[in-house]
Image (tube, rainbow, N blue to C red):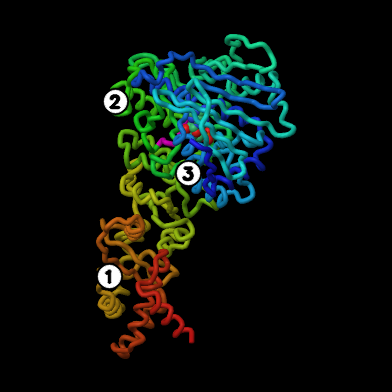
Amino acid sequence: MSTKTCHFQAEVSQLLDIVVHSLYSRKEIFLRELISNASDAIDRAIYEGLTDKAIVADAPTWEIYLRVDKTARTLTIEDNGVGMDAATIESCLGTIARSGTKAFLEAAKAKTGSNAPETIGQFGVGFYAAFMVATNVTVNSLARGPNATAVRWCSAGDGDYTVSDGDRTTPGSAVTLQLREGMDEFLEEWQLRNLVKQHSDFISYPIRFVDAAKPPAVAPAPINTMRALWKRAKSEITPAEYNEFYQHLAHDRHDPLKVIHVAAEGAVEFRALLFLPSESTFDMMMPSSQRRKGLHLYVRNVFIGSDFEALLPEYLRFVRGVVESSDLPLNVSREMLQDDAVIRKIRSNLVGKVLATLAEMKKDDAPAFQKFFRAFGRILKEGIHFDHEHAAKLQDLLLFPSVRTENDGLLSLRQYRDAMPAKQKEIYYLVAENLATARQSPQLEAIQQHGCDVLFFVDPIDAWVAEDLTEFDGCKLRAIDQGDLELGTAEEQTVAKQQRDEADKSFRPVLDFIREKLSDELSAVRLSPRLTDSVCCLVAGQGRMSPSMERMMRAMNQDVPKELRILEVNPAHPLLARMQQMLDADRNDPKLADYVELLHGQALLAEGATPRDPRKFTKLVAALMA
Ligand code: ADP
Ligand code: MG
């Protein structure tokens, strides 16, 4: 192969620039990242070697070397893991986080603006962190297995890289950094020992230090202790160690919000070290194939994989960590994991632990729980639909904004229930596209006058939550834009109904007229118990799909039949009397038909929808104004 020069994907060059110039304050993390990659490469070699003996034909002693050459000013991180062939090296090192790069850059821009580096740190810069300290990076690699050819990858981190034939003769990879001016500390043994101790002590393969200027030792003593954190007693682990391990594992620059360390004995023995992150990452809402796998499974010290779904359900996919069990066969495959009885026991135990931890956090540290819920609530809510076994526990964890919560405050169902006035019999909620639309809904008018609060279901997933969550603590949940709404005490209801029936007699002709004009949109037109100020609103019939649900389904490309709606009009509004007068004077007055159109358009606008004929609507409004 001749040397070939390739260009990084456009986004990669941008990202490299940010990495090199903005992450400077923590430049030493490059070492943790490269050691992590070396350790991952060995994990993969061991795992693949379980089924393919050719991979481990050389019966290797798994190890990682840090080599310094003070004369050449280079630092090399070398492993004898899986290695890379030319194709792998191009696909792995020519793109960052492969599918996620572009989405990441967009998210970083949108979210933090000038603060982008925070987000980048969170994302984990991985291999590219090397350019913070190096002017040039060379990777010499030989993939494991027969017929592999050595390959060399070189880049100055400025947008291009070269791939050429390599000369490595033993399987594995060596990443050599030509250090930048002023980075000589990374040639010092004491400094490298220090950094390994701090960031990589738990790496489970020996990390050995070699100085090219000194006579070679056969196998220098490891500089890490290799003690897997999850195997140690909780009492002897410091918060700093937990944090460091989490950052290594999750590629997150922040400390975790919560640590869950489990050592289960009995029918199934396993250990788990789980973390709740403090912030969401952009990939959480992506399809599972594009997500970083956050939960690693080890069987007898061998890394098996990051099979997330078998160990924890999808709705807990924000959980990061490690699970280790000796009760599983080493050759366990992903397919076997799905229906293995031991895995099922572990899974149900872990789900219980995570939910219990969240419940405890909600009780003892409400601000932390709110922070958690803002970041991951919409993922957790998926459980309401998919995990009926834990439905009750999940319900207790839900938080929603409401009419009464200010700004972005959140309320639990329990808090809502406890604050309900005695005469209120149901838990009221309104599904809407967003909080602003919800807060302005005319549907809230009379309810508020009755001293009741309304929960806002404004996450896309909430439409489904509403379907599954029909009752809480013996109290039905009730969409306020659906069916008849009975507010107040029994007497108040009777009085209100009498008044409406009375008014209905005088307004019936105009109500029927409206219905007739909008017969393909409406199933009925009636006087409203919901409104105090607004002139009209649309509601769904009892048991019919609520309007907001219908819109949500359409937005998600679901095929839903068009529901006829009920138009409710406010009898106290002068417009209704005016229209009745016009009708009495001249049934064929063209203005009357226009008013009907405007009325319907307003009702749609109020719920965040568009009038059925926006052009006609605006023309009519303009004509009225002129
Ligand atoms: P991540 O480790 O999060 O996947 P990195 O940027 O650190 O991202 O590495 C990118 C990819 O390059 C890795 O996923 C791996 O496939 C490959 N890689 C990096 N270093 C090595 C190595 N020492 N041996 C084999 N593959 C490696
Ligand atoms: Mg990495």
Q: Which mark is residue 336?
A: 2
From the viewer's side, name the closer residue of 563 and 41.
41
Residue 522 is labelled as 1
Tag 3 residue: 100
Find the distance from the CA under tag 3 to the CA under tag 2. 29 Å
Q: Is residue 215 above or below residue 540?
A: above
In the image, residue 82 lies at what x, y percent? 45, 25
* Residue at the top extreme of this rendering: 218
Q: Pointer 1: residues within 10 angstroms few (<14), some, or many (20+)?
A: many
Which marked residue is nearer to the observer: mark 3 or mark 2?
3
Q: Is residue 336 left or right of residue 242?
A: left
What is the span of residues highlighted in magenta in the rendered image? 316-320
Q: Which of the pair 483/215 is nearer the observer?
A: 215
Q: Secondary structure at mark 3?
A: helix
Secondary structure, mark 2, is helix
Q: Earlier in the sequence, mark 1 or mark 3?
A: 3
Corner quadrant of residue 24: top right
Query: Which residue sits at x=38%, y=64%?
Result: 530
Image height of 400 relative to 583, above or below? above
Q: Secondary structure at mark 1?
A: strand
- Which of the 4 image quarters holds residue 67? top right
123 is within the stretch colored magenta = no
Q: Position of residue 498 (x, y in %)?
A: 30, 68
| Rendered position, 4 above or below 579 | above
Q: Earlier in the sequence, mark 2 or mark 1?
A: 2
Indicate left or right for 105 with 70 as reference: left
